[in-house]
Structure formats: C-alpha cells, structure tokens
Amino acid sequence: MKLRSKLHYFDRITGLPNRQYLYKYFSKNISEFIVILLDIDDFKYANGTFGHKFGDKYLKAFSIKLSKILGEEGDVFFHNGDEFLIFLPKLELEMIDSRIESLLKKLQDSFKVEGREIYNSVSMGVYITKENDSIDDAIRKAEAAMYIAKRKGKGQYRYFDENVEKDIMKKIIMVNELRKAITRNELYLLYQPVLDIKENKILEVEALLRWKNGELGEVSPVDFIPIAEETGLIREIGYWVIRKACNQVKKWENENINLKVAINISPNQFDDKDFFYNVKNIVTREKVDFSKIKFEITETQILKLEKRNMKRLIELTKMGAVISLDDFGVGYSSLKNLAFFPVSELKIDKSFIDHININKKIEKLISSILFVAYKMGYKVTAEGVERKEQLDKLLEYGCNKIQGYYIGKPMTESDIIEILQRSTII
C-alpha cells in the first residue's frame, strides 16, 4: 500500500485502520460479523489532567494492548476520540459472552504511560448483525448499546435489542422536553427536612429538584439528571435551582421562618468558568445572606477542582456560605480531604446508615468518622435514616444532624411549615 494511501486508511495516533479502511474493505460483508463499539471510561479526565500529548500516548498504548489481546480472533479499528470498533466472527451467544468478559477483564489491568500507572475500564456495546444491515446502522446500534452500558455504571457491556432502541427514543424525547422545562415552568423544588438533634428542631432543609412534564408525566431525577449532565443542560438548570432556593429563603424570612437551604452542585457546574461569579451575583441580587445557603459537593468533585476554583470556593466560605462534603465515605475518602479542603460539614452516605445494627464493622466506621469530624470542628449529618434503631444508634454516637424518611420525605414548602409547627420532632 502506497504511503499516501496508508495515511488515508490508518489513524495517525494509534496506527490502527480507521473508518475509511472499514468502509472500503468490510462494508460488503458486514453481516458476517459481531460489531462491538468500545469506549475508554474517563479518558477525557486523564487527557485533561495530564495533557493531550499524554492522551495520545495513552491511546497508542491502549490500542497496542487491545490488538494484542484480540490477536487473530478479531479485527480492531480506530473509530473516534477514545472509541474503538471491534469486529468478531459470529459465534454462539455463550461464546460471545465469554470472549467479551475475558476482554473486559484483561483491559482492566493497569499499564504504564510515561512512567504513570494507568488503571482503566471500558464500556462496550455489542450488536449481532443481520443479513441486510448497513455498516452505518450496525455501528449506530453498537454505539447506542455502549451508551446504555455507560449509563448503567461503566466497566460493562450491553447488547443492542429492542429495549435499547426504546431507551434511545425515550432519551431523545426527554432531551427535547428538558430543554423547554424551565420556560414551561415544569421544574419545581421539594425540601427534605434536616433535624438538629441537640435543638430537636428543623433548622435546615435540602432542596431537591423535580420535573413534571405534560407528555412524560412525573420524571424521576434518576432518569433526567444524568441526561441534563450529559447534554450540559444542568448548568442552566443549576442556576435556576440556586435562584429558586434563594427566593424560598427570602420568602421564609419574610414569614419569620429561619431556615438554611442546602443545594447540590453538579460536577458539570464546576466546569463553568463563570460559576462562582454567577453564584455570587444570584445570592447578592436576591438579597439573601450567604450564611443561609449551603453548597453540597462530593469528594470526587472537590478532588478535581482547579486551584483558581478552589480559591473561589474559599471566597464563598469567607462570605458565609457553608460547604458540605456530600456522600462522605463512598468516594476517594481521605482524612487529608478534611484537613486541606474548605469544608465545614460532612454527610455520611446512606449506604453506611443502611448497615446500622447489621454490620458491626460499619458501625465502628461511622463512630470513627464522627469522632474525627468532631475533633476537627466539623458538623455531621447522617442521611438516609429510615428506622428508629438507626436513629437510636446515631444518638448514642452523638451525631449532630439527621436526614431521611424517619424525619420526613421531600415535601412542599407548605408541608415544611407544618412540620416546623410541631412541638417535638422525635
């Protein structure tokens, strides 16, 4: 093959045959193959952290490893970005599962790039071609299955079937409807009470986003928030939530109700270079004291913060805003995070609370988290408290605050007022 022709048919970085090669030499006999679209999970994070040159070397090393694993058993092509196409000859379904699971396991092993040890996982979509399939349709269906696998938690694979097709159509409709949700006034907030145990009072609530659409009905946050994240709509929606929460704080103030409101901040919002500037403007414009606002962020988010954003986060705390470390214990938990990051509160994840009176080791871990947090002057909220025996154990450990169905489900503003009027909560 002449050099010019070779450059046309092979990817410059990975050295693998590309889509042009695929269309020229495989399009006529596509029905003889199983098509797999493979995506490297979190490649963009490594690329953004260490730079594009590192990213190119990462892709090269990965493609070499992938080719070696496949050997003569299949063909691999560079598709796009951090995606690869694999063509396997048709096999019995059990053998396909075995082959793919073996591939997943081998690709999860670490390898070195520029002296750095890289641990990666991959998500794969699998399509078993039919007689009259076009190559574009086969790739599209494999890609659709891959996105479903990624949404289910990454590091896994999914076959294309009718349910995947339905999921795609549902997602398309949801994206279109979500774009109009703010202007149609379809979004609203519920508030889940947080009990201050010492005071035996509700002194704060967590604002929780909900969506009721004319066509789709009540849409679960589990379904629409990942789509908002993926499409970038979460930024606009996030600012709407902050404005709405500030409006509610001001309204309660006018009614002589003193409540702090906690707001969850999405990782995507932190990527917005104007985020801290916009937050400051919203809170100031709504004439709300920063001390009435709490921002809940996860450990994963705070670890990825750039220095300039860390400084801005510190500025928010200087204005009086509280930063709470959400889902503590399930991310990259480290005592160092408590010492160096500008947080003053922790939320112990529900997955720990669920094991109270079931797992003694988990109980000791909860007790230890509380002990260290209090020594450092932090307040702690236990979320997901649903049973009295959980509450009793947390009272025994001296936990500051409790949140969960035992205290109250997410509720409307009028329901919050009703619960505030009770003489005792527990």
Image (spheres, rainbow, N blue to C red):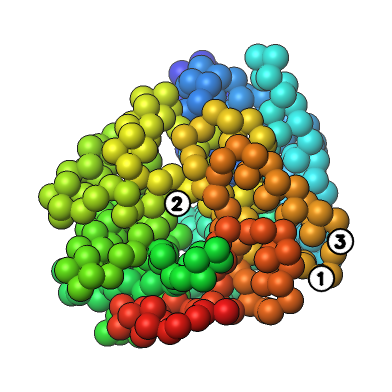
Which quadrant of the figure contains the N terminus? top right
Q: Tell me the residue at 79%/59% (across/down).
A: 363
Of the residues shown, which amino acid type is indicated by label 1? Asn
Q: Tell me the residue at 75%/53% (across/down).
A: 367
Find residue 218 and report its image quarter: bottom left
Which quadrant of the figure contains the C terminus? bottom right
Q: Position of residue 19 (x, y in %)?
A: 50, 40
Does residue 297 appear anywhere in the picture? Answer: no
Tell me the residue that label 2 is attached to.
Answer: 296
Mark 1 and mark 2: span between their CA atoms? 28 Å
Q: Where is residue 223 in the image (x, y as percent from the top left)?
A: 46, 70
Of the residues shown, which amino acid type is indicated by label 2? Glu
**On screen, residue 60 above or below 22:** above
**Secondary structure beneath disc 3?**
helix
Q: Residue furthest left?
A: 285
Residue 164 placement, left or right of 350: left
Does residue 144 appear anywhere in the picture? Answer: yes
Disc ID at residue 360? 3
Of the residues shown, which amino acid type is indicated by label 3? Lys
Residue 280 placement, left or right of 129: left
Q: Position of residue 83 (x, y in %)?
A: 55, 41
Kindly indicate whether the residue at mark 3 contacts the one at mark 1 (C-beta within 8 angstroms): no
**Secondary structure beneath disc 1?**
loop
**On screen, residue 182 above or below 28:** below
Find residue 393 and report its image quarter: bottom right
Q: Position of residue 201 (x, y in %)?
A: 46, 71
Q: Tell me the residue at 22%/42% (across/down).
A: 280
Residue 158 placement, left or right of 274: right
Query: Of callouts 3 and 2, which one flags the residue occurring earlier in the amino acid sequence?
Result: 2
**Secondary structure beneath disc 2?**
strand
Tell me the residue that label 1 is attached to.
Answer: 357
Mark 1 and mark 3: span between their CA atoms? 7 Å
